[in-house]
Image (tube, helix red, strand yellow):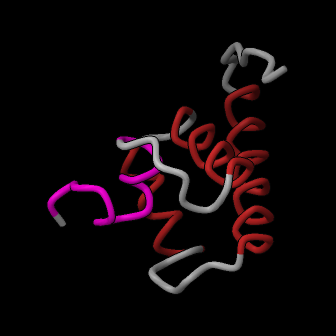
């Protein structure tokens, strides 16, 4: 992987700001990236999404679930989480 557009979906979404899975899914992935390390994000991605073409609704469901877990962890740790509104 060389970090160029089209190389990896996470790089495309996070670095190049490309529309990969649609606005809702891409936004969820960006929010997840704000709440965890890149390593943790990569591990989640490999475990839950992987290289198989992800059906958008499945990806959104998994991303929502992961974001909820991370928000809960952040709140339990005393982080102030800005409103997404």
Residue 54 x, y percent position in the rendering:
62, 78
- What residue sits 40% from the left and 53% below the top? 12
Residue 5 shown in magenta: yes
Q: Quadrant of residue 37?
A: top left
Q: Which sits in the foreground, 44 or 25?
A: 25
Q: Which sits in the foreground, 37 or 7?
A: 7
Left or right, residue 17 beside residue 25: left
- What residue sits 72% from the left and 71% below the top? 56
Q: Which sits in the foreground, 13 or 36?
A: 13
Residue 4 x, y percent position in the rendering:
22, 55
Q: Quadrant of residue 81?
A: top right
Residue 28 x, y percent position in the rendering:
68, 46
Q: Which sits in the foreground, 25 or 46?
A: 25
Instruction: Reply above or below: 36 against 66.
Output: above
Count of marks, rendered view: 0
- From which residue to which does the magenta span run? 2-15
- What residue sits 70% from the left and 13% below the top? 80
Quadrant that contains the N terminus: bottom left
Residue 56 shown in magenta: no
Left or right, residue 57 beside residue 29: right
Q: Residue furthest right?
A: 85
Instruction: Reply above or below: 1 against 54.
Output: above
Quadrant that contains the C terminus: top right
Residue 5 x, y percent position in the rendering:
30, 56
Q: Residue furthest bottom?
A: 52
């Amino acid at each position: 992987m060389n970090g160029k557009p089209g190389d990896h979906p996470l790089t495309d979404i996070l670095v190049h700001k490309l529309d990969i899975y649609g606005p809702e899914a891409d936004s969820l992935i960006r929010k997840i990236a704000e709440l965890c390390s890149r390593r943790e994000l990569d591990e989640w991605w490999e475990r839950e999404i992987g290289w198989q073409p992800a059906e958008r609704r499945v990806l959104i469901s998994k991303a929502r679930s992961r974001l909820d877990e991370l928000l809960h962890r952040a709140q339990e740790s005393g982080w102030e989480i800005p409103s997404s509104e």
